[in-house]
Image: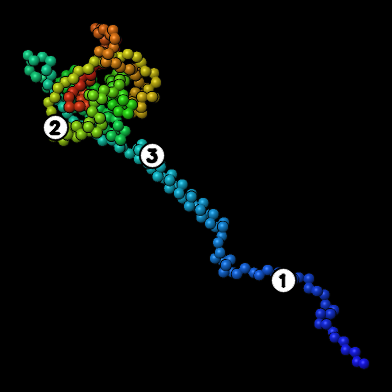
Amino acid sequence: MVKIAFSSPFSGKEPAKDTHCLVQDQDPEVATNGPDTNSTGRCLLTLLGVAFILAGLIVGGACIYKFFVPRHKTFEGQLSYIDHTDLDEEPYYLPVSEEAVIREEDNVAEINVPVPGFSEGDSAAIVHDFDKLLTAYLDLQLQKCYIINLNTSVVLPPRNLMDLFMKLATGAYLPQTYLVREELVVTERIDDVSELGVFIYQHCAGRETYRLQRRDQVIGYQKRSAESCMQIAHFENTFVVMTRICHE
């Protein structure tokens, strides 16, 4: 009997210590072009940063425009009136030239009143604030402020007042109008002007400021000969107003 023996090719050899991973490698094209979560997040953060920067530039530009670029219009005009207080005398003509700063968006009118050349009067700056419904008279000589409720039946709103001054500035409208007199008296001192609005605050901050009332509305008030008064000839309508402000 013949005995046949088979020799294994792996006999006498040690098994390989290192084996290859059976997980299939990732396709290089997929690895290159596939979605990257971190990259997307960085893009979104960059876009948000740019948006915040643009918003800051827009808001900052608006603030600079509001506070540094003038949005008001300035007009200069002239009115003349006839004083009919004494019919035996010749009519008295008084030219009144003023410069008005109209802030239509802020609903404010500022009137600069020079000293009248043909009558007694005082120079003043007048602020009509239609939002606060207040009028401020600044005596430019004594540097004192006087505050009273805005008389909307006399003072034209900023838009109408601007139209009036435009006509006066072009010379197309030179009426000879009448004179209205008003007499105001000081009633009390105002120590804090911060609540009177930004425009009145700009005129009156750091100055003596007083509240006014119309003389005919003060109960029991008697006119005194020792009163110290100032008077301002001004116009915020088609007629001239002669305002007399008196201390006791």
Give the residue at x 28% y 23%. Answer: 150
Inspect this view and state whether residue 162 appears: yes
If the image is split into quadrants, where does the N terminus sit? bottom right
Name the residue that disc number 2 marks: 173
Identity, as a three-letter code, of the amino acid under mark 2: Tyr
What kind of element bears circle 2?
Answer: loop
Residue 216, x across and y down, in percent: 25, 13
Say whether marks 2 and 3 touch (CB < 8 Å): no
Q: Residue at x 34, y 19 (%)?
A: 209
- Dividing the picture into quadrants, the one containing residue 11 is bottom right
Q: Residue 222: where, in percent of width, then height?
A: 26, 7
Quadrant of the rendered image containing residue 103: top left
Residue with the mark numbered 3? 63
Viewer-closest of 225 and 206: 225
Q: Which residue is mark 1?
A: 20
Q: Residues within 10 Å of mark 3 (few under 14, many from 20)?
A: few
As shown in the figure, which amino acid type bears the numbered disc 3?
Cys
Task: Specify few, some or many for label 1: CA neighbours under 10 Å numbering under 14, 14-19, or 20 or more.
Answer: few
Q: Residue furthest right?
A: 1
Give the spatial CA distance, label 1 vs label 3.
68 Å
